[in-house]
Image (cartoon, rainbow, N blue to C red):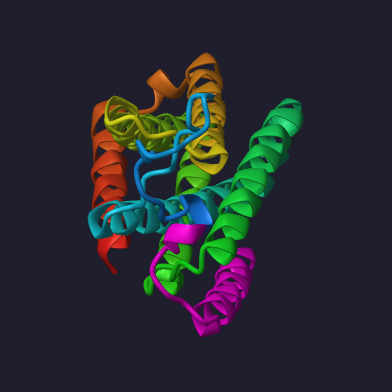
């Protein structure tokens, strides 16, 4: 339990520093430059270069919300694995490389969203300290229940996270399709964001596969454990998008 309290204390310190940083809604110019449609008065015989469509307020809010909840989710994932690893690897040392691999990927995801949050001046969720404590407690408690329960936790979390990333990708692709249908170009940053979300989603789903391969389905009672964790994830996502 001392390691869990230490992790929660460190995460709380991190959240305070993040919450003290200046914040404002996602900058339109940081993702798409506000421009006007191509002018028909261009005297050049060459085809006019397509312009970029400025973001609406709704689109800015959506992207800010997406970055905020993704950052919170990746922090929670690193804390879950940090809390599980000492307990699991003590009894199952052969799982040490797998646990380290999954943690390293989650830590890289967190770094990615920390950078994006900072770059676009997005306010982190105000519930950072709470999510940190709950994630550490979830990781430790499922590890104490056994390897199967810890893997079932990963299965449940990654199922919800993978679905959430898919929804974000779908929404951004719909925005892109609208812009292109209206004759606008799409900025490289938006395309890069879609690629980043796809890559991270695929790595999260890889973790789900690892969990199933390591007997997540044998956790007892599997249906109850995974459904409770999935419901908690959905609730945390909903709140983090708004608070």
- Residue at left 36%, top 45%? 53
- Residue at left 51%, top 46%? 144
Camera-side residue: 185 or 192?
Answer: 185
What predominant SS class does the magenta segment belong to?
Answer: helix
* Quadrant position of the N terminus in the picture: bottom right
Picture coordinates of residue 224 (x, y %)? 24, 34
* Quadrant position of the C terminus in the picture: bottom left
Picture coordinates of residue 13 (x, y %)? 59, 79
Q: Is residue 169 visible?
A: yes
Q: Tell how many labels.
A: 0
Camera-side residue: 25 or 243?
Answer: 25
Camera-side residue: 1 or 50?
Answer: 50
Picture coordinates of residue 238 (x, y %)? 24, 54
Quarter-of-image position of residue 217 = top left
- Residue at left 38%, top 58%? 64
Residue 224 left/right relative to 67: left
Quarter-of-image position of residue 175 = top left
Residue 50 left/right relative to 36: right
Camera-side residue: 89 or 134?
Answer: 134
- Please provide the residue range marked out in magenta: 1-29
Picture coordinates of residue 3 (x, y %)? 64, 65
Asked if 176 appears above or below 116 in the picture, the reply is above
Asked if 39 appears above or below 122 in the picture, the reply is above
């Amino acid at each position: 339990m001392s390691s869990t309290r230490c992790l929660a204390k460190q995460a709380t310190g991190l959240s305070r520093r993040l919450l003290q940083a200046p914040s404002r809604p996602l900058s339109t110019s940081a993702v798409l430059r506000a421009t006007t449609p191509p002018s028909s008065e261009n005297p050049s015989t060459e085809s006019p270069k397509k312009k970029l469509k400025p973001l609406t307020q709704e689109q800015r809010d959506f992207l800010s919300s997406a970055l905020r909840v993704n950052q919170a989710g990746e922090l929670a994932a690193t804390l879950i694995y940090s809390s599980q690893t000492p307990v699991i690897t003590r009894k199952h040392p052969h799982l040490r490389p797998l646990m380290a691999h999954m943690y390293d990927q989650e830590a890289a995801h967190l770094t990615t969203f920390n950078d994006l949050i900072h770059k676009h001046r997005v306010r982190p969720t105000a519930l950072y300290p709470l999510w940190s404590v709950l994630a550490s407690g979830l990781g430790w408690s499922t590890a104490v229940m056994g390897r199967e329960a810890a893997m079932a936790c990963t299965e449940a979390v990654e199922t919800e996270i993978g679905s959430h990333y898919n929804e974000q990708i779908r929404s951004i692709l719909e925005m892109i399709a609208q812009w292109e249908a209206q004759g606008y170009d799409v900025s490289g940053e938006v395309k890069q964001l879609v690629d980043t979300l796809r890559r991270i989603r695929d790595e999260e789903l890889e973790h789900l596969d690892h969990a199933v391969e390591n007997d997540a389905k044998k956790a007892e009672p599997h249906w109850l454990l995974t459904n409770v964790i999935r419901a908690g994830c959905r609730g945390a996502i909903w709140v983090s998008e708004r608070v």
